[in-house]
Amino acid sequence: MARKRGQFRVVQHLLFPAVAVGVLGAVIFFSFYPSPPAYPFDLAAYIGVAWIPFSAIMATVEYRLHPERVLAAGRAPSEAGGGSDRNSFIEVFTYIYRW
């Protein structure tokens, strides 16, 4: 969302995400309708569906570990305070295994 009320744009912040969710839903639906594809092609559909909650969980964990990095996403590295940290991925999995 836009940080300030004056920065909110209906097309950018409402319409584009709604269309993206609709397209994703259609792709998932037609991956299994009228029936799932035959083996081994069905694995790609199941992995794709499983990837959605997995990526949401990973984004949530990353936000809990490093909220400043998540909030800096989309900005240029010079604006965000430097480059990316390669150890971040390892930290996320270490955090998950500690649960």
Image: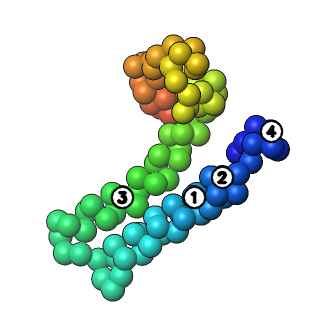
Above or below for 58 versus 26? above
Q: Residues within 10 Å of mark 4 (few under 14, many from 20)?
A: few
Q: CA distance from mark 3 to mark 4?
A: 35 Å
Give the CA distance from mark 2 to mark 4.
13 Å
Q: Which residue is mark 1?
A: 16
| SS at badge 4 | loop
Q: Which residue is mark 2?
A: 13
Residue 37: x, y in percent?
23, 75
- At label 4, the amino acid type is Lys
| Mark nearer the N terminus (1 vs 4) | 4
- The residue under the point 81% across, 43% down is 6
Residue type at numbered disc 1: Phe
User: Residue 86: which quarter of the image?
Assistant: top left
Q: Which label sits in the foreground, 3 or 4?
A: 4
**CB under 8 Å between callouts 2 and 1?**
yes
Instruction: Determine whether, in the image, residue 93 is placed left or right of residue 70.
Output: left
Identify whether 43 is placed above or below 78: below
Badge 3 element: helix
